[in-house]
Every structure is written in C-alpha cells, then in structure tokens.
Image: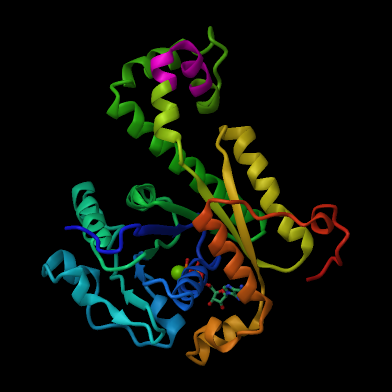
C-alpha cells in the first residue's frame, strides 16, 4: 500500500474547545495548499458535528467514514470533489473516530489507508475535546495543530488539550520501552528527588540515566505541536501566541510552535451562509495572507516571525 505521492503529510487539527474555528482553519489551509497545486484531501472526523462540507457549500456527502469501517468501502471511493481543483473531501459520521467502538488497531488501519491515498497533504478535522481517541489520532499525525481563540476559557481548554496529548505520548514511551516500573518507583519516592510534576519527573529521569535520555531525545525529536490563533481582533491578541509558547515551556517543558493567526472577519460567517468557500470569494482579504503564512509555517515547522513593531506593541491596538 505505497503512496504514489512520496512525501504525503497527514495533518491533524484539534483544540480543547468547540467553535474556535478548527473547521474554518482546516478548510482554509486545505484550500490554500490546493490553490498552490498540491493534491490535498480533507477528512472530517468531528464527533457528531461533521460539517466541513458546509465550508464548500456542499450538502452532506452520501458516503462517510462509517462506510469505510462498516461496509469496507475503500477510502478512495468515498472522496467527494470539493469544487476546488486538487481538493477532495472525506466526510465524517456521527461518532466516527471518537466512538468507543473504534479501537487503536482500527485507527492504525485508517492511517495506513489515509497514507496510501494519492495526495501530498491530508488534513484531518478532529473536532473538540480530549477524548482518548482524539488524542491518539492527533498523535498519529505528522503535523499536530491546535486552534484556539484568544479568550481565557478557550486558552485553558487548549492548554489542557496539549497537556493531555503530552501525557499520552509519555505513556506510550514508558510502555514501549518498559519504563513503567522505573517511573512508578521514582514517582513513589518523588519527595526525596524533589519531583513535583511530569516536567520535573522527566528532567530527573533524563539526568539519572543515559539510556532514558537517549530514548526521550529520539522519541521527542520532531515532536512539535503547532498553535494557531483564530478570530484575533487586536495586536494584543496576536501576542497571546507568544505567551502560550512560554506557558507550555515553563509548565510542561514542552516546546510548541506558534505558527500563525487569523483575524476575525465577518465575511467568514457570510460566506458559510451563502455557500461560498471563503478563500475563493475573498481573494483580497488580509485573511488570505494570514492563512498562507500559517500554512507555510506548519509545513516548514517554523514559527511566526514577530515583526518588530508587533513585538513591541507599537502597532495600532485594533487590527
Ligand atoms: N476567522 C474568523 N472570523 C470570523 N468568524 C469566524 C472565523 N473563524 C470561525 N468563525 C465563525 O465561527 C464559527 C465556528 O467555526 P468552526 O465551525 O470552524 O469552529 P470549530 O472549532 O470547527 O467548531 P466545532 O467545535 O463545532 O467543530 C463559524 O461558523 C464561523 O461563523
Ligand atoms: Mg468543526
């Protein structure tokens, strides 16, 4: 099951909270890639709320992921055309990836089939929440993206999501390398080694053994969570992404990439209602450039470069 497009990259778009713009960012980044000429497929895997097709003005497609799982219909055959050249869409189904019924082996199978699709980029819209299946699917992707809005409640949920992803990843590492007993012993005796949380536990284990340090370095190399801020209204909002980077580093010891932001634009709402894909009908909107920047940063693994005037807050307060 070889992928003809060699460097096929699977993106997973998630976030702790509903309504932050995961589907808008997924559909827009996918459109941006397709317009550049990259064969792209969007996969809607949202729990109970599969609506990615609406961002392209399409009705709910006839086939969905449950036909792949239940009726063994090949993934290739449930792709519908989005109406944009190079861009296909696979729709979700109620409960699809989040259902208790889909086990880890089935998720791995889905990923094998996803990677075999004839596409350079496959973007999965995972929906909100921290269900274990969402975390596992997120961790199987090459590009892990969280979308949040710059509001305290959404930021808290996003931090909780990143923390849950990180814990899950650590659990996999501990299990794969038979480290669970060592971890439990260290945690039991944490007072004597001055360990209070996962960050300190990992730092302690890394220092105590070359073997463990090598395992962590190998497993964590290339592990990057990309943050996208959506619906920003002010330049102050844009800087929230920088704070998130510091919070994840200080409290989890986890480097994250701030890939970009997208401003609040009333046209998004209008386009959804009038069944017009945003990027196609708003070519001159500043949002187009913002989507392009964040997409390029995600591909390259680079951070949003903070312009000097932005970083020192000398731009006007309102965008
Ligand atoms: N940049 C934006 N500017 C203006 N409105 C936006 C923007 N992004 C999203 N919206 C609005 O927010 C609504 C929710 O967006 P979207 O459906 O993408 O969120 P979601 O995170 O996928 O939600 P869910 O968790 O329900 O799947 C959209 O219907 C749209 O009206
Ligand atoms: Mg959505």
Where residue 270 appears, as percent x and y from the top left, is 58, 88
Say whether residue 191 is left or right of residue 52. right
Say whether residue 148 is left or right of residue 29. right
Where residue 318 appears, as percent x and y from the top left, is 81, 70
Q: Residue furthest left?
A: 71
Regarding residue 289, the answer to whether it shows in the image is yes
Regarding residue 15, the answer to whether it shows in the image is no
**What colouring method underlies this structural image?**
rainbow
Q: Residue at x 57, y 44 (%)?
A: 256
Where residue 301 appears, as percent x and y from the top left, is 53, 51
Judging depth in this view, the residue of 66 and 142 nearest the camera is 142
191 magenta-colored: no
Q: Residue furthest top?
A: 192
Q: How many numbered marks are there?
A: 0
Say whether residue 132 is left or right of residue 190. left
- Is 117 rendered above or below residue 182? below
Principal secondary structure, stretch drawn in magenta: helix
Q: Residue at x 33, y 34 (%)?
A: 172
Ligand number 2: quarter of image: bottom left
The quarter in which the C terminus is drawn is bottom right
The quarter in which the N terminus is drawn is bottom left
- The region drawn magenta spans 202-213
211 magenta-colored: yes
Where residue 47 appears, as percent x and y from the top left, is 35, 64
Q: Residue at x 34, y 26 (%)?
A: 174
């Amino acid at each position: 099951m070889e992928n003809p497009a060699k460097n096929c990259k699977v993106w997973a778009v998630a976030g702790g909270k509903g309504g932050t713009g995961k589907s808008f960012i997924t559909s827009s980044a996918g459109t941006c890639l397709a317009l550049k000429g990259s064969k792209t497929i969007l996969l809607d895997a949202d729990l109970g709320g599969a609506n990615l097709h609406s961002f392209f003005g399409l009705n709910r497609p006839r086939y969905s992921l449950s036909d792949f799982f239940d009726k063994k219909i090949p993934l290739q055959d449930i792709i519908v055309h989005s109406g944009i050249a190079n861009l296909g869409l696979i729709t979700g189904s109620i409960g699809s990836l989040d259902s208790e019924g889909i086990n880890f082996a089935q998720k791995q199978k889905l990923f094998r089939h996803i990677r075999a699709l004839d596409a350079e980029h496959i973007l999965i819209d995972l929906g909100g929440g921290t269900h274990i299946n969402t975390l596992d699917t997120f961790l199987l992707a090459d590009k892990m993206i969280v979308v949040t809005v710059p509001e305290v409640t959404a930021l808290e949920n996003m931090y909780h999501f990143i923390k849950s992803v990180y814990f899950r990843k650590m659990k996999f590492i501990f299990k794969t390398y038979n480290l669970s007993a060592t971890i439990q012993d260290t945690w039991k005796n944490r007072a004597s080694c001055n360990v209070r949380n996962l960050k300190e536990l990992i730092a302690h284990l890394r220092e105590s053994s070359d073997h463990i340090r090598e395992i962590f370095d190998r497993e964590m190399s290339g592990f990057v969570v990309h943050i996208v801020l959506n619906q920003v209204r002010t330049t102050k909002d844009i800087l929230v992404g920088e704070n998130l980077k510091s919070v994840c580093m200080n409290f989890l010891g986890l480097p994250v990439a701030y890939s970009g932001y997208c401003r609040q634009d009333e046209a998004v709402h209008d386009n959804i209602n009038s069944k017009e894909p945003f990027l196609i009908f708003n070519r001159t909107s500043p949002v187009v450039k913002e989507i392009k920047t964040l997409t390029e940063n995600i591909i390259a693994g680079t951070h949003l470069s903070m312009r000097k005037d932005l970083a020192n807050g000398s731009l006007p307060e309102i965008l």
